[in-house]
Amino acid sequence: MTRIQRRIGKVSKLGIRLIILFHLVILLSGCYVLEQGYYQLNMLNAAVTFQNVLSNPNISQKVKKKILLVMEVKQFAIKELGLKYSKSYSSFVNIKNPYVAYNLSASRKDKLKPVLWKFPVIGVVPYLGFFQLADARIERDHLDKRGYDTLLRGVPAYSTLGFFGDPLLSTMLHYPDPVLIEIIIHEMTHETIFIKNYVKFNEALATFIGKKGSLLFIKKKYGVNSKWIPYMDGLNQDAILFSQFMEKMIKHLQKFYSQQIPVNEKISQRDMIFKKYQKYFQVNIKPQLKTNAYKDFYRIRLNNAIVLSFRRYYEDLKIFENIYNALDRDFSKTIYFFKQIERIKLDPNLYLRWWLKNKKNYNR
């Protein structure tokens, strides 16, 4: 019996549904999922219901206030934004580490081509998630030795697409209320709309809905004169501005990488492009920003994995804004529209562009 198998034997109180899915994924995906699956199930086993947390005198009032806020956000997202109801965010887990998990992504050095991994249910993804930093570093070092650009970063939250009923994590409570609100709506979007094999689309859509939905919630809860309104408006505007800037840089990089020159020359010359755009950002984009969300971009030591990570979350945010405007800025219509895209089995990015050109024929 392996070490992981012995560990799994100790995990109790798990539903039949979890165990069946867990073993199915192990059979299809191997040791990586076996290792990470143990930590996932163990964390779920440690979850405490919101009711028990709120009635526990040993839990701080700060944590309880955050939980009450999350409960409000969830109801708002379901009733007024049209996001899907699930059992997520009805329990709490205290995480001892600063992050709940670590995401590792990689790319070719001579082109914007991510390393991809394939899994059941979710399909092809451009990153791996690890619950233990040491495990993530081992895999990162392996990819580094194979000549890839890599990016390893900690994450405060993630989504299992609602299958497991994701708990609220203590790592999410360190953020100010507006950011926490955005995280909850972002993750609930993944549970509502998920198109297999299109991670960039899923993440960019969740980024847009998270930012737009959190602004609507804040206006309703705190009023249109809330101090958070200018901040959230600024975040939304900055995200679109940054998205447009990244699109310009990525087009330049793609054109450069497509040249018929030796790979070593591409790798040596790409730094000049990185520095050119970081200087452009510092001089032209940073003065336009209304928040500090992206202010340090020009200081980052860029590589292709980092560029692709930015693109994953910020590609074509303006197109989502255009869809929202075309649907009368009605959130329920917008969510319904994107849910229908799941059914058409087409490239969602191409479909959005086609729809905007032909929206007069769309029967709302």
Image: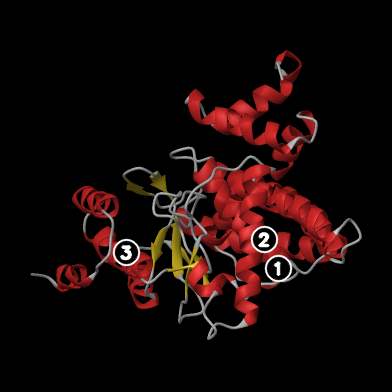
Q: Residue at x 66, y 73 (%)?
A: 65
**In the depicted view, which residue is nearer to us: 360 or 281?**
360
Snapshot quadrant of residue 60: bottom right
Which amino acid is tagged 2? Ile
Mark 2 and mark 3: span between their CA atoms?
26 Å
Q: In the image shown, does 266 or 218 lie closer to the viewer?
A: 218
- Residue drawn at (72%, 59%) of the image: 277
Q: Residues within 10 Å of mark 3 (few under 14, many from 20)?
A: some
Q: Is residue 24 visible?
A: yes
Element type at mark 3:
helix
Observer-nearest of 323 and 312 = 323
Query: Considering the image in quadrants, where does the N terminus appear?
Result: bottom left
Q: x, y (%) of residue 329? A: 79, 36
Q: Position of residue 256 (x, y in %)?
A: 60, 48
Residue picked out by circle 3: 41
- Residue named by callout 1: 177
Q: Quadrant of the C terminus?
A: top right
Which of the two residues, 11 or 143, is positioned nearer the viewer here? 11
Residue furthest out toward the left: 1
Is residue 256 in sight in this rendering?
no
* Left or right placement of residue 289 versus residue 185 in this view: right
Labelled pair 1, 2 in contact (Cβ < 8 Å): yes
Which residue in the protein does label 2 denote? 181
Secondary element at image label 2: helix
Residue lying farthest to the bottom in this orientation:
58
Dot 1 alpha-carbon crowd within 10 angstroms: few under 14, some 14 to 19, many 20 or more: some
